[in-house]
Amino acid sequence: MSKVRNLAVLTSGGDSPGMNACVRSVVRAALYHDIKPFGVYEGFNGLLNNKLQELTYHDVSNILNHGGTILGTARCPEFREKEGRDKAYANLKAQDIDALIIIGGDGSYRGAQALAEENDIKVIGIPGTIDNDINGTEYTIGFDTACNTIIENIDRIRDTAASHNRIFLVEVMGNNSGILALNTAAASGAEEVFMPEKSEDLLEIKTKISRAIAANKSSIIIVAEGDQIGGAKEMYNYLKEYGLVDKVRVSILGHLQRGGSPSFLDRLYAALFGELAVVELLKGNADLMVGVINGRVSTCSLDLARETSPPKNMDYLKLIRKLSIY
Ligand code: ADP
């Protein structure tokens, strides 16, 4: 078993709060264990274009409280081709780098596995996405901050909704997943949630909105961006056809959900995940993702993590219904 001498860390896919705290953890843990850490700028793009730089202890000072990623992130179509990955590997070898830690999502892991299958490089994934939809782990870095941002903004919307007895369709992110929508709906006291994993009966939506209008009370309805209707705007347009939008307003929270200083939970998991990734490499392990598994910070195979996972708590729907007027 050859000891890891030099490692590289990159952030890939969508950014999420806590990625910087995780980069710091990887770099500091590597230095502690006498491994030389390199940062790769702009995800797989940086590997192809040789944007690698050795990182010192102080290069990652005072970054853990900032959202986004100091390394930058990008999508890289060339990495899907072997030719692109060959270029990436040549750049890693030129610096004598024998391990790569990828902070990102399932797409990034598919890329990392392709690189490791074709070349002599150890890869470890760390789940970083606000969507919390990666298979194999109960937690992804950024989820808690994004949930907090969403509920803070819903509180503000609720102030105006209550003052005017309005019904707000609040669209939240999540890509093809309803996990952010479901969890924030349960936590924010929303009256209803629309999400991709739940079949939507258009007639039922109409009936529910009519009931809310008749009650003459304010309501918060969370709509996942990937829901079956196509988001809050589309739902509004559908209701408009039936003359049901007088009291309805749309608020699309958008990219503000991706930014901000990471919460306590995101910083903590970022520190734990980063350190464990380095320790696993030291033990000679690879082709793994670090995550929360059965409530503990541990690892699972990258094969398991190559896919997204459905929400594990669909029973929150019953809770939302029980506590709402609909
Ligand atoms: P995420 O990691 O958040 O799921 P993406 O799905 O956009 O984000 O993937 C990030 C990058 O991973 C892509 O831009 C591409 O470079 C690489 N990638 C994704 N899927 C593959 C694949 N099947 N083979 C090689 N590289 C891939």
Image: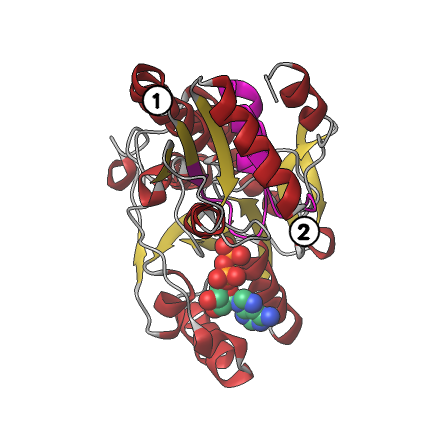
Q: Provide the residue designation for mark 1.
A: 161
Q: Residue at 59%, 47% (x, y): give it.
A: 177
Secondary structure, mark 2, is helix
- As shown in the figure, which amino acid type bears the numbered disc 2? Ala
In this picture, which residue range is highlighted in magenta? 170-199
Q: Could you classify mark 1 by the number of other residues whose Cα lies within 10 Å: few (under 14), some (14-19), or many (20 or more)?
A: many
Against 286, residue 136 (above or below) is above
Q: Nearer the viewer, residue 194 or 279?
A: 194
Q: Residue at 46%, 23% (x, y): give it.
A: 219
Could you say where residue 81 lies in the image, as x and y percent from the top left?
Answer: 53, 81
Q: How is the image coloured?
A: secondary structure
Left or right of 261 on screen, residue 169: right
Label at residue 305: 2
Does 187 appear in magenta? yes
Q: Could you classify mark 2 by the number of other residues whose Cα lies within 10 Å: few (under 14), some (14-19), or many (20 or more)?
A: many
Answer yes or no: is residue 31 visible.
Answer: no
In this view, the mark in front (2 or 1) = 1
Q: Residue at 57%, 63% (x, y): give it.
A: 112
Q: Quadrant of residue 178?
A: top right
